[in-house]
Image: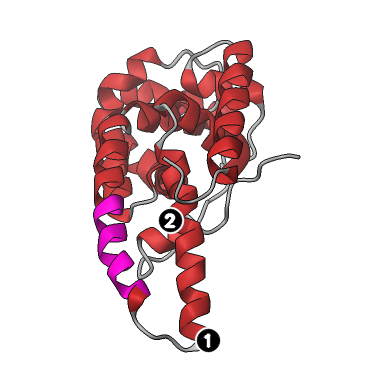
Amino acid sequence: MALMMPAVPELPAAPDAPDAIDVPEVGGDDADADLVARLRAGDRAAVEVVYVAHHAAIRGFARRLVGDTASAEDIVHETFVALPRAIRRFRGEGSLRAFLIGVAANHSRRHVRSATRRRRATERLAAREEIQPRTVDATAALITRQMAHRLWAALDELPIDQRVVFVLCEAEQRTSVEVAAIVGAPEGTVRTRLFHAKRKLREMLAAPEDAP
C-alpha cells in the first residue's frame, strides 16, 4: 500500500498563514541562462527577478518540509541571500527553480530541528486541552489536530536526507530523476532514501500511540 504525504501538515503549524501559491515556471532554458549569467556577474536586480519568479515555490517546499511558517520564511530568506554565491555551483543540468530548491534544502537542516522543538512544545500545551469536556465539533477538530501531530511526529523522526526526498517525491510529485538533480545524489540513492523513508513512516504510523 502506497504511503501518501498528508495534505494537512502545513495547516496545523500555522493556521493563520495563507498557503503559498506555486507559480509555474516561465521563460524556459534561455531565460534561465540569461538570469544565471546576470547572477554570476553580480547583477543584484537579477536576484529580485529570480525572487519574484520562484519565491512562492521555495516557500511551499519549505513549509512542506518543516511544517512551520516562521522557519519556512527563514529558509526562503537564507536561500535568496545565498544565491549570488551558490549560483557558481549551477551547472545547467536542471531548471533554476530546481537548483533553488536544492539550496533551500541545504539551508533547512537547523530549521527542521528548531521547528520540531516548537512543534513538540505546542503539542504539550495542546495536550492539556484534551481533558476538557467538548462538543462534537470541537472533538472532531481535536482528532484532526491529533492526526496531524502524529504525522508530523513521524516525519520528525526521519533523517533530513530521507525527509527531503520524501517531501519532493511524495508531496511535490517529482520524479526520482528530478529529485536526484535537486539534492545532488545519484537516482539510485534517491530511490533508496525514499524506500527507507516510506518504510519508517509506515512502521511509526502503524504503531500504537502509547508505544515507546
Residue pushed farthest bottom?
135
Residue at the image position 47 percent from the left and 52 percent from the top: 150
Residue 205 in percent (x, y) is at: 56, 45
Q: Amino acid at mark 1?
A: Val
Q: Is residue 181 left or right of residue 86?
A: right
Say whether disc 2 or disc 1 marks the residue closer to the N-terminus.
1
Main structural element of the magenta stretch: helix, strand or loop? helix
Residue 142 picture quarter: bottom left
Residue 36 in percent (x, y) is at: 41, 24
Q: Quick check: 159 above or below 155? A: above
> What quarter of the picture does the N terminus occupy?
top right
Residue 149, labelled with which disc? Answer: 2
Q: Which residue carries the number 1 mark?
A: 136
Over which residues does the magenta segment extend?
Answer: 119-130
Q: Amino acid at mark 2?
A: His
- Label 2, label 1: how far apart the Cα atoms are: 20 Å
Residue at the image position 50 percent from the left and 49 percent from the top: 151
Residue 118, labelled with which disc? Answer: none
Q: Is residue 25 magenta?
A: no
Q: Is residue 129 magenta?
A: yes
Residue pushed farthest right?
1
